[in-house]
Image: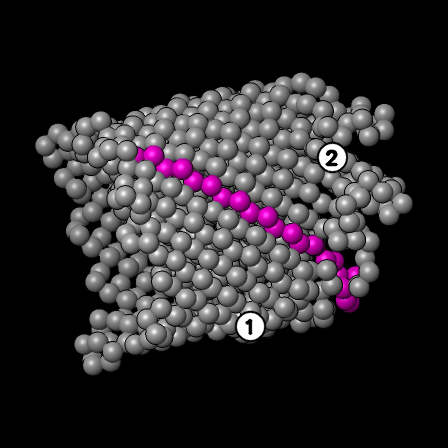
């Protein structure tokens, strides 16, 4: 089968060693520590930005231009802020359009989280962490094999943190959060040529979104919302080798449920009575469910100096969204979103031709048929006649053929030159087609919205030496029919999404370097292993055809990670430098450059134990990241035992 290193696009791999060195809680925080064009708020889900496209944090994943996978299957939106780092084996980031293989949502790239699997002898680990702002985390993992043909892995963790403090505005009242994670997998080797994997993940995240009022966070702010997000995922993966090294069959199925509940006061204050209007509360529960199945065939045909790898498949996906429950008090505004059922049928094919192990040519295409049916939310009966009139039944269909072509050439073992062309598509969500209510504004529907599309061109090269790896890419993306928000009325606020008449253009130089210094240091008699990795990006152009810049993208970013190991001691420091960014496209407000440093150290003792201590925001950056002040310098310590 086609290996990652043979693809004509840059695939960045964050391995287990990098994840452990980062000492972060979630997958999103690991990516934030390593990957350029990543942003986040302090207390809300991580945002991923690739090739000028942002992945949002709403539950309606149909409008996200970056696809997140768990072991190759689609994951619920916001999984980056849920998935625990201790359960990850590696993360693969495909920096470029992949709609020809994955369909809608892969316009800007793909983030694939590969989970740990059980193998070898039975093992277990236990960990406990404490830190600033009443931070605490407890976790456990277990893995192993049963009867030599069943392997398993399970992990569980819980962490919580109290209200944190910012440098500029003091204590951020109601910024506390807590999260529970459970995940695991079971792999059964049915025979020598077939196996079945069953996996699950359950995450529950509770947090609030505090707001600055003037020069501080008020202790009492009734406009604050409490969010409770629940993510449940189940999948199975059946692999059958029909002809060794020649013909394989894969069948994949999955189910994701994403619940998004919020209310106007902390749940502790509400007790069990969400329906008590005398307490001036409302409760809203959005439910997003995705059920999917995919069958693919891999065929490898060697013909002398030419090797031909073909993958062909068919995927089916059903996405359903609804508003489950609703309570309203006139003191508060509420979010109102329409429900929908979207069916996606997609055949696809990709051919990878390798000639003399030096030249690789990739040709692929995917045809997507989307059938979207709208439905009234379950809270429809609670709405006024005026609001009920906004929701109309109906349907929309979209059809799209997405191609890709790429080539790579390796004139010598240490050098690979690449070029790639790809297209992407994102279909509009039901909310944008029918309209919805937010706490601060009304959004009119636009049934005439067309899908967003993109064309991406990329060229670059990789250099691999015993001590150094270097990669550099130039990317150009042309973005058409972008969904943009326009103002219809100022008081009350009314907006509407339309397809922009302007093209959006994005150009960048994206690269990285890894220095493995251990061998060199040992040759000088220094018994130290060290690795320095640096990812960098310079955004040459990120604006529409009228020169309006895309907001929240820094002009440039550099992310460095240095890891040093000496005997039973490990030290890691992460340094990030980001250039100026546009904070608001309408006003032209800019965000200043900043330098951000994290550091941690680990000590291994008594064969089975590990102690670690970490400090975050060492430079005490106070700049806004997506409109939220940064948390002040804070600390963690922890102990881990492995058996």
Mark 1 vs 2: CB contact within 8 A: no
Q: Residue furthest bottom?
A: 525
Where in the figure is residue 639, as x and y percent of width and height? 46, 70
Question: In the visual, does 213 lie left or right of 297?
Answer: right
Q: Which residue is more in the foreground, 156 or 562?
A: 156
Looking at marks 1 and 2 on the same chain, the residue that comes earlier in the sequence is marked by 2
Where in the figure is residue 290, as x and y percent of width and height? 54, 31
Residue 39 is drawn in which quadrant? bottom right
Which numbered circle lies on residue 43? none
State the residue position of label 1.
635
What's the magenta bit mostly, secondary-structure-wise?
strand
Where in the figure is residue 371, as x and y percent of width and height? 55, 20
**Viewport quadrant of the N terminus:** top left
Q: Residue furthest right?
A: 278
Q: Confirm whether residue 215 shows in the render.
A: yes
**What residue lies at 14% left-to-right and 39% top-to-bottom?**
356
**Viewport quadrant of the C terminus:** bottom left
Which numbered circle lies on residue 325? 2
Tell me if residue 563 comes above or below residue 324 in the rendering: below
Residue 166 is drawn in which quadrant? bottom right
Q: Which residue is more in the foreground, 421 or 228?
A: 228
Residue segment shown in magenta = 195-217
Dot 2: few (<14), some (14–19), or many (≥20) neighbours within 10 Å?
A: some
Q: CA distance from mark 1 to mark 2?
A: 40 Å
**What residue lies at 28% left-to-right and 33% top-to-bottom?**
190
Dot 1: few (<14), some (14–19), or many (≥20) neighbours within 10 Å?
A: some
Where in the figure is residue 580, as x and y percent of width and height? 57, 61
Q: Confirm whether residue 473 shows in the render.
A: no
């Amino acid at each position: 089968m086609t290996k990652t290193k043979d693809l004509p696009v840059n695939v960045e791999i964050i391995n287990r060693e990098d994840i452990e060195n980062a000492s972060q809680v979630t997958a999103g925080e690991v990516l934030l520590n390593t990957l350029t064009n990543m942003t986040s708020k302090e207390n809300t889900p991580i945002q991923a930005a690739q090739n000028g496209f942002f992945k949002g944090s709403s539950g309606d994943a149909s409008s996200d231009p970056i696809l997140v996978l768990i072991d190759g299957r689609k994951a619920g939106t916001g999984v980056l802020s849920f998935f625990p780092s201790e359960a990850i084996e590696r993360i693969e980031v495909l920096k470029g359009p992949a709609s020809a293989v994955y369909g809608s949502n892969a316009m800007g790239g793909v983030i694939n989280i590969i989970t740990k699997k059980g193998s070898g002898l039975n093992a277990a680990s236990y960990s406990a962490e404490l830190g600033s702002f009443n931070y605490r985390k407890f976790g456990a993992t277990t893995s192993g094999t049963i009867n030599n043909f069943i392997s398993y892995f399970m992990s569980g963790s819980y962490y919580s943190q109290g209200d944190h403090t910012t440098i500029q505005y003091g204590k951020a009242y109601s910024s506390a959060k807590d999260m529970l994670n459970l995940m695991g997998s079971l792999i059964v080797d049915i025979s020598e040529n077939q196996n079945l994997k069953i996996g699950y993940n359950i995450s529950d995240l509770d947090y609030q979104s505090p707001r600055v009022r003037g020069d501080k966070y008020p202790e009492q702010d009734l406009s604050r919302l409490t969010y409770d997000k629940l993510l449940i995922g189940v999948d199975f993966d059946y692999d059958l080798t029909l002809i060794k090294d020649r013909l394989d069959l894969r069948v994949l199925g999955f189910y994701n449920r994403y619940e998004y509940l919020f209310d106007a006061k902390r749940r502790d204050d509400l007790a069990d009575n969400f329906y008590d209007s005398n307490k001036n509360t409302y409760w809203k529960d959005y439910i997003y469910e995705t059920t999917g199945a995919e069958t693919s065939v891999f065929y490898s045909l060697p013909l002398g100096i030419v090797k031909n790898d073909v993958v062909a498949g068919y995927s089916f996906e059903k996405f359903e969204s609804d508003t489950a429950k609703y309570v309203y008090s006139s003191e508060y505004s509420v979010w109102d979103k329409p429900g929908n059922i979207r069916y996606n049928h997609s055949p696809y094919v990709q051919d990878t031709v390798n000639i003399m192990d030096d030249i690789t040519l990739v040709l692929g295409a995917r045809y997507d048929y989307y059938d979207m049916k709208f439905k009234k939310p379950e809270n429809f009966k609670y709405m006024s006649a005026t609001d009920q009139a906004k929701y109309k039944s109906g349907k929309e269909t979209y059809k799209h053929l997405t191609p890709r072509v790429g080539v790579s050439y390796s004139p010598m073992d240490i050098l690979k030159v690449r070029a790639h062309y790809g297209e992407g598509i994102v279909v509009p969500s039901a909310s944008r087609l029918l309209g919805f209510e937010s706490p601060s504004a009304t959004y009119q529907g636009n049934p005439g919205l067309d899908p967003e599309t993109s064309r991406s061109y990329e060229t670059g090269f990789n250099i691999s030496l015993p001590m150094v790896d270097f990669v550099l890419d130039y990317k150009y993306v042309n973005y058409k029919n972008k969904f943009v928000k326009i103002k219809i009325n100022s008081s009350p606020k009314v907006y509407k999404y339309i397809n922009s008449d302007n093209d959006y253009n994005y150009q960048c130089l994206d690269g990285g370097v890894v220095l493995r210094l251990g061998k060199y240091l040992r040759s000088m008699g220094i018994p130290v292993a060290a690795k320095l990795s640096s990812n960098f990006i310079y955004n040459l152009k990120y604006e529409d055809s009228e020169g309006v810049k895309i907001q929240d993208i820094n002009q440039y970013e550099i992310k460095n990670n240095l890891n040093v190991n000496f005997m039973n001691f490990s030290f890691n420091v992460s340094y990030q430098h980001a250039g100026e960014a546009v904070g608001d496209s309408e006003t032209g407000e800019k965000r200043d450059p900043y330098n951000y440093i994290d550091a941690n150290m680990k000590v291994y003792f008594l064969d089975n134990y590990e102690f670690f201590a970490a400090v975050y925001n060492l430079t005490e950056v106070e700049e806004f990241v997506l409109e939220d002040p940064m948390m002040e310098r804070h600390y963690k310590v922890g102990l881990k035992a492995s058996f």
